[in-house]
Image (cartoon, rainbow, N blue to C red):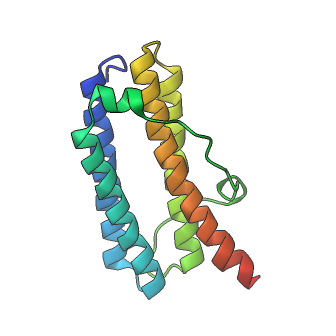
Amino acid sequence: MDLSNFNEMIRFAIRKEQDAATMYETYANLAENPGTKRMFEELVEEEKKHKKLLEDVTRKDVEDYKLTDIPNLKIAEYSEEEEFKPEMSFQEALILAIKKEEKSYHLYNSFVKGTDNPQLKKLFQSLAQEEAKHKLKLETEYDQHVFKED
């Protein structure tokens, strides 16, 4: 993979979004808990939206993208990774999804460090930011539904 090729990196990101959508769709189809099933279905839709955005992105879009700091509730950092199982609880499913989004965030951040091209650096930062937004949404849900119950 050529970290200096804008189009190749967009294609890579599109494949990652499609792979994530497929994985979450598989989880949704197998999940026994209705809340877990619904959460995975929502994640499928989020990943499909990101894929569509990437399919239409131009270099100008990347230049105009506004980077912001995304809060980190650090739930992923204090949680053990979960493996999918059809009978998993909503809490376990949230942890699984949070960890997957965290991995994607770290992947794109590693790409930021792997290129000197300012345009690609911004592309990777924007992709990392989108993954951080996913993670924050899931961590907020965890905070509201799981911590609230404890």
User: In the rendering, at what x and y percent does residue 63 appear?
Assistant: 39, 26
- Is residue 122 visible in the rendered image? The answer is yes
Label count reads 0
Whether residue 81 sits left or right of residue 100 in the image: it is right
Q: Residue at x 26, y 27 (%)?
A: 8
Extreme residue toward the right, this view: 150
> Relative to residue 4, is residue 144 depicted above or below?
below
User: In the rendering, at what x and y percent does residue 76 appear?
Assistant: 65, 56
Q: Residue at x 51, y 42 (%)?
A: 129
Q: Nearer the viewer, residue 145 or 118?
A: 118
> Relative to residue 76, is residue 66 depicted above or below?
above
Q: Nearer the viewer, residue 143 or 97?
A: 143
> Relative to residue 78, is residue 40 depicted above or below?
below
Whether residue 58 sits left or right of residue 68 in the image: it is left
Whether residue 130 sits left or right of residue 45 in the image: it is right
User: In the rendering, at what x and y percent does residue 110 appear?
Assistant: 52, 29
Q: Point out the image quarter for the C terminus.
A: bottom right
Q: Nearer the viewer, residue 94 or 131?
A: 131
Q: Residue at x 46, y 79 (%)?
A: 36
